[in-house]
Image (cartoon, coloured by chain):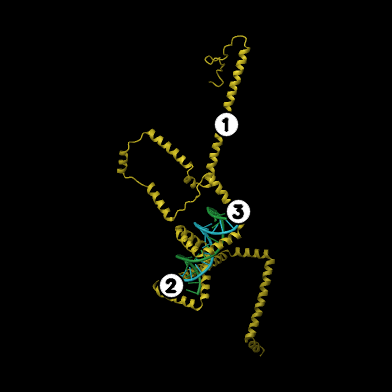
Chain colours: A yellow, B cyan, C green
Amino acid sequence: MTDQLDDRIRDTPDATDAAAAAREARLERRCEYDRRWRKENHAKVRAYRLAYDAAHRDQVNAAARESSRRVRERARAEGEQERLEEERRERKRQASRDWYARNKDRHLESQRKTNARKKAEDPDKYRVDKAARTKKWADANREAVNARLRAKYREDPSKKAEAARDYYERNAEKVKARRRAYYAANRERQLEAQARWRAREKRRTELGLPPTRLHRTTAAERKANAAAADAFFARQYTPPQIRAIREQEPAPSREALDRWERESARARAASFLADDPTVRAALSDTELRHIEATERRRREREQQDSARAEREQLRREEEERLDAVARQVNERFRRGPRPPEQYDPAHPPAFPSSPSRGLGL
DNA sequence: TCAGTGCGCAATACGGCCGG
DNA sequence: CCGGCCGTATTGCGCACTGA
């Protein structure tokens, strides 16, 4: 009777749950106790483990092999799954692309209609949404977008310049006002820049350099220049042309050729260093400074050399003068005839020499 | 010396078109 | 519906230069 009752109670959902929960709790307590014991008796556990593994070496190894095989298999299966997923997605993308290609006009037409409808329904929302989308994309692709713009501008600046002129014509006052505001807001910096510019400009005019230091070339000009250079440097003469040229002009002599090469080298150097505005304009500030410094040093050296020569000349003259005075004094006080020269270069005195050492001259 | 501004170049804003 | 890309308009910035 009690058993039947117990069964009935146990069969009710509540009772079953309660019993399961109790079992769970007992198990949990047991596991907790085991964990603690193992932790506290780490050495014992390890020793037992080693002994067991040694005793069942083959079995343990087989189990390990089996386990890693299963791990590998699962990983492969997941990879395969992933690959299949990707393939499915790609097929879907391709199908979509095909569909758009086949129904382009239809798609665009419906899209235009949808956009127009949305715009008519709520223009502000349409605008704001579109702006947000565009901005999101632009923020994520800023560098690439700007690089493209720069390249495009470099390819042909004239279009943009024209647009700017156009805009300025329509908004001159607005632009000027903005410019004034900018000047006022950055007055100090503007004045500093102005001072720098004035100093540079002063130096430029003192050196006699031309005002424009940059020659801007358009893409078309660059292409034409490159083509001309190619045509010039890569030109090839046919053998008949070469023969004709040789017959026209007799072969120059070796001396003439050497002279021509020397003159050419000098001419190139002179041309490079010449105070020619177009040459100087092509030089960087550093190069200009270098050339100026070199010239300045050369001038200083020349001045020093000529000053030294002048001093030397004065010294020689003074010595000459003193010698003359001394000779006069000598003559005046000489009592007997002048003795012969002590040293006769035609008959130098005998010089002692060593047979084994010395300079051996 | 200063205020003003022309101008070139870069960056940004904005909306349209279209692929997916 | 979103994102990618484009063309055009606009703004930002600073050097170059002028006139008072």
How far separated are the C-alphas under marks 3 and 1? 44 Å
User: Counting other residues with Cα less than 10 Å from the Cα at mark 1, is it few (<14), some (14-19), or many (20 or more)?
Assistant: few
Residue A267's mark? none
Could you tell whether A263 is left or right of A312 in the image? Answer: left
What residue do we see at 60% from left, 23% from top? Answer: A318
Q: Residue reaching furthest top?
A: A336
* Same chain, labels 2 and 3: yes
**Can marks 1 and 2 be said to lie on one chain?**
yes
In what element is the residue under mark 3? helix
Element assignment for label 2: helix
Pointers 3 and 1 in contact (C-beta within 8 Å):
no
Q: The residue tagged with tag 1: helix, strand or loop? A: helix
Residue linked to disc 1: A307
Earlier along the polypeptide chain: callout 1 or callout 2? 2
Q: Chain of mark 2?
A: A
The residue under the point 44% across, 75% down is A112
Query: Does residue A338 sit above or below A232 in this rendering?
Result: above
Q: Disc 2 designates what residue?
A: A96
Pick whichever of labels 3 and 1 is earlier in the sequence: 3
**x 39%, y 33%: residue:** A255
Name the residue type under label 2.
Ser
Q: Is residue A2 visible?
A: yes
A36 or A276, which lies in front? Answer: A276
* Apparent side of residue C6 relative to residue A17 in the rendered image (left or right): left
Residues at marks 1 and 2, CA–CA distance in whole angstroms: 92 Å
In the rendering, at what x and y percent does residue A295 appear? 53, 39
**Dot 2 surroundings within 10 Å: few (below 14), some, or many (20 or more)?**
few
Q: Amino acid at mark 1?
A: Ala
Residue A153 x/y as whole percent: 47, 59
Q: Which residue is mark 3?
A: A192
